[in-house]
Image (cartoon, rainbow, N blue to C red):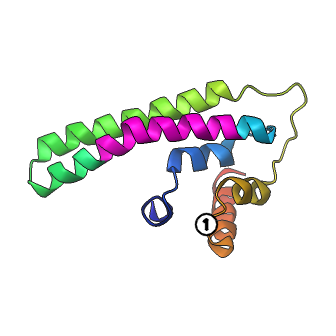
Amino acid sequence: MHWQERHGVDVIFLLFACWLPHALAPAHWTALESGSTDWNAAVTRRVRALRRRVRAIDWPQGYRAILGMELASERIEATWLARAASPPERAPRDPDLDQRLGRLFGQLPPAERTAFIAAIRALFY
């Protein structure tokens, strides 16, 4: 969430980039990032901004409802990404996450990226 606030990183796209178990051509990554960015700008960020405004007026029921909409928007994005990234016939088993994240999220500090990858690997590998 820190990267989302500080560097404008789409957390769903970041997690997807770490989760995808196979390699994709750079053009495919570009298309996925573009679609993800479009959805995020048109839907998720707008709902998030609304949620933040509602939080300021102390309306718990409204806040929870809008939070549900925000999470649903992120699930739609994640589902689209998974479907749009069909696996190649021969998929490598262990992607180079540092290279992948460096290419996709070059704005992130390398030390933070390395720590994130270590944390992800400890959880999922």
Magenta range: 30-48
Q: Nearer the viewer, residue 84 or 34?
A: 34
Q: Residue 67's image quarter?
A: top left
Residue nearest the viewer, comparing 93 with 48: 48
Dominant secondary structure (helix, strand or loop) of the stretch shown in magenta:
helix
41 is within the stretch colored magenta: yes
Residue 125: % across, % down: 73, 52
Q: Is residue 73 above or below residue 6?
A: above
Q: Quadrant of residue 27?
A: top right
Say which element carries label 1: loop
- Please give the residue where the numbered disc 1 appears in the rendered image: 108
Q: Amino acid at mark 1?
A: Leu
Q: Residue furthest bottom?
A: 111
Badge 1 crowding class, 10 Å Cα cut-off, few under 14, some 14 to 19, many 20 or more, is some
Counting from the top left corner in percent of width and height, residue 35 is at 56, 34
The quadrant in which the N terminus is found is bottom left
Residue at image location 63% in from the left, 55% down from the top: 123
Q: Residue at x 75, y 53 (%)?
A: 100
Looking at the picture, how far across and down is residue 83, in whole percent?
A: 63, 24
